[in-house]
Image: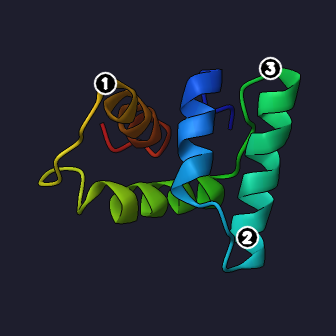
Amino acid sequence: MILPLTPREIQLVIHWRTRAFWPDEQRVLNKLEVALRQEAQPELSRLQVQILRGWAEETLGGSYGGGEVGNPEEVSVLRKLQEALGEI
C-alpha cells in the first residue's frame, strides 16, 4: 500500500527508529529512505505499516487513544497509519 506521507513526515518517522533491531525494521527504514530521496510516498506492506505503528506507540507514549501527541505532524502521521490499517 502507498502511505501518503510528506517528506517531513518521513523524516520524522525515520527519527523514531535510527537503528533497526530486526531485519524487517531495516527494510522499513530502507523503504522510507528511498522514498525520501526520490521525493515519493513509501510503498509498504500491511506488516510494515504495523511496524511503524509500533514505533509510534513506543516513541509517542502509549496507545493512540490515551497517548499524548506533541505536534501536528505526529498527529498527521498517526492518523495516516490508522487509516492505512483500517482503524478509523
Q: Residue at x 23, y 60 (%)?
A: 63
Query: Do the residues under discs 3 and 1 have CB atoms within 8 angstroms?
Result: no
Q: Of marks 2 and 1, which one's residue comes earlier in the chain?
A: 2
Gap in angstroms between the C-alphas marked 2 and 1: 28 Å
Quarter of the image that includes the N terminus: top right
Instruction: Please rate how many residues cluster around mark 1, counting C-alpha atoms within 10 Å: few if below 14, some from 14 to 19, many from 20.
Output: few
Query: Do the residues under discs 2 and 1 have CB atoms within 8 angstroms?
Result: no
Gap in angstroms between the C-alphas marked 3 and 2: 22 Å
Query: Mark 3 or mark 2: which is in front?
Result: 3
Of the pair 83 and 66, the residue shown nearer to us: 66
Q: Which mark is residue 72?
A: 1
Q: Is residue 72 visible?
A: yes
Query: Pointer 3: what residue?
Result: 39
Of the pair 70 and 87, the residue shown nearer to us: 70
Residue type pointed to by label 1: Pro
Of the pair 11 and 26, the residue shown nearer to us: 11
Instruction: Reply above or below: 75 against 52.
Output: above
Query: Pointer 2: what residue?
Result: 24
